[in-house]
Amino acid sequence: METPLFATHSCVAVEGGKVRVIKLRKFAALMAASTLVLAGCSSSSDEEGSGAYAGPVKDTPGTINVLAWPGYAEDGSTDPNVDWVTPFEKATGCTVNVKTYGTSDEAVQLMQAGGYDVISASGDASLRLIYGGDLQPVNLDLIPNYADIFDNLKDRPWNTVDGKNYGVPHGRGANVLQYTIGKVNPAPTSWSVVWEPNSPAKGKVTAYDSAIYIADAAVYLMSTKPELGITDPYALDQTQFDAAMALLAQQKPLIAEYWADYTKYIGAVQSGSITVGTSWQVIANVLNGEKATVGAVKPVEGATGWSDTWMISSKTEAIDCAYKWLNHIITPNVNAQAAEYFGEAPANSKACALTANPDHCKLYHAEETDYWSNVYYWKTPTEQCLDGRTDAKCVPYAEWVKAWSSFRNS
Amino acid sequence: MTTTIRARRLLHRNSGARVTTLLALPLFWLVVLYIGSLAALFVTSIWKIDTFTSKVVREFTFQNFIDVFTDKAYFNVTIRTLFVAICVTLICAFIAIPMAFFMARVARPKYRPVLIALVITPLWASYLVKIYAWRTMFYPEKGFVNWLIQPLGGSSPGFGIFAVIIGLTYLWLPYMVLPIYAGMEKLPNSVLDASSDLGAKSGRTFFSIILPITWPAIIAGSVFTFSLSMGDYITVQILGGTFQMLGNVVYQNFSLNLPFAAAVALIPVLIMMVYLGSIRKTGALDNL
């Protein structure tokens, strides 16, 4: 996963007798201004420079409005037995209001409108919010549970910008290739079954209905057309982007439906109108509830995926409650409950011992570093190429959205 | 207490104040909420967005309209949307005219309220429930439609434009039946008697007398079916497969590029304005 384009810098700052290790992992593009990086390293040691809350976290009662993916902040209203919000309220005196959202784009819109204190953001939402000034850097010293987070989730480009951490990782998952057992023979191990015109599942393929799915085409092109030179499916220059769109056009005749609503997807698989396509592990689990009807694999080409982070609004007035929430939500047993309820790999390494199903972490590959090496987490594509190329201009997300909208209506 | 009396006196003496108080709420609704939101839609469509954060930047541009009108995909989707709306309207009219005629003219008067209730009954169920029911019926292999067609050697068309037209027709049919029923009920018996006295058979009476007189009512019904079909996107999402309409374009873009979505949303508004303008002369608007 560590492409040589990412550089890791560590520097030690001594501050009031307390030694802190500050890690900086930056885009190589930003590295170009290496003097700035060094300056950032030394200046981020003082809290003024990073803009993060200096602490200490006080016992101020307050109310926080939480914006979360469904299943991430359960307060018992979905299922009385699934509740990790009420214990938090009782322990801290903070009141929590939860609002859920369906897509990253919706989350960005709601967060920009304001009124929310903390958010669970995927990588394709977080950068837009950080650069939009909607989030504040997080002082990780004030979040004791952060120490137990898997190392390969820390200081990543979607949660850390200019050496400043903007939140705590929650969980991650891969967008797997799901197929109906017995309907797709032989069982697929490659994405070719959803992209190639001679697919045995022609007319019964599904794809994710969002512009971010263009990255899935790019992942396939990375192994089938290496001459395009794609190293990061979210950093596509115009030629690479056009190739991805051409692949999507080639795929269109195979598609039965594009999906965004996973309950509808489940119904379509059960009825047999969809037999293969991109999916989430949680969908496969629901389908396999009674007996195994579908298989879910991460194909040989790798896959796109998500890695979610809890972040704090720059406009919050309940900063103490917000920090307490961030610490609470990644507590091993809470993280275990949430990850298991949603169906993804937890971010806290100690959560694996506490899941109700002892095999949960194995099922979701939480501890296998290798598994994640070709999972390309959702990120917001920017004009400045995310893979560090400085000689090329990449297609920004707004253009992805335009192209996707035009493609879906062509 | 005295203020109430004073207010009463004022309203009694001053007719202007009386009318203003009476109409304040409806006018607020019409001007501020209705026309105001249309104006906001238009204003939004001439703004830009910050391409990275998707935030609306209040700078003037016609780029959104250029994008809408130069990309062939949006021209095609407009044509497809129009096609669906016209098909739905025609099928609704085709079914509703004989239905309304039967209800208003053939059935015994004591059964009429029952028949009207039956037509309205589907409106009591949630839109989503009905469309999901159609979804299960349209499943390519296991659905009801497939079961129905299979003995005839066909197979279900599955999800797509056909399923969307059927679903929308089902949803909007009552809106076509009711105005036509009202129009046919108003038909004076004397003209029908005169027609038969002069020797016209029932077919001739229907096409020469009933249809022309109820034409404005049919057009009134078409305003509902046409405009509701133009703007629908949920049925299309559920029954459309990969098929999309204008509403879906708006839905796809509103969270990321609000000005562009606003520009697209103006297309059905324009089409409806043209449509309403062209039927104004038929007197259909009096029948709404």
Image (cartoon, rainbow, N blue to C red):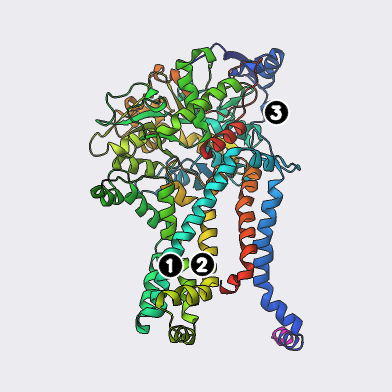
State which chain disc 2 sits on.
B
State which chain disc 1 sits on.
B
Magenta stretch prevailing secondary structure:
helix
Say which residue label 2 marks. B221
Whether residue B201 is situated above or below residue A241 in the rendered picture: below
Number of residues whose C-alpha sits closer than 10 Å to that of mark 2, classed few (under 14), some (14–19) or many (20 or more): many
The magenta region covers B1-7
State the residue at coordinates (48%, 76%). B210
Q: Mark on residue B96?
A: 1
Quarter holding the C terminus of chain B is: bottom right
Badge 3 and badge 2 both on one subunit:
no
**Between A107 and A62, the one nearer to me in the picture:** A107
Left or right relative to B196: residue B248:
right
Which residue is farthest top?
A: A4
Label 1 element class: helix
Residue A207 in percent (x, y) is at 43, 34
Marks 3 and 1, how far apart at CA: 72 Å
Quarter holding the N terminus of chain B is: bottom right
What's under tag 1, amino acid-wise?
Answer: Ala
Q: Earlier in the sequence, mark 2 or mark 1?
A: 1
Number of residues whose C-alpha sits closer than 10 Å to that of mark 1, classed few (under 14), some (14–19) or many (20 or more): many
What's under tag 3, amino acid-wise?
Answer: Glu
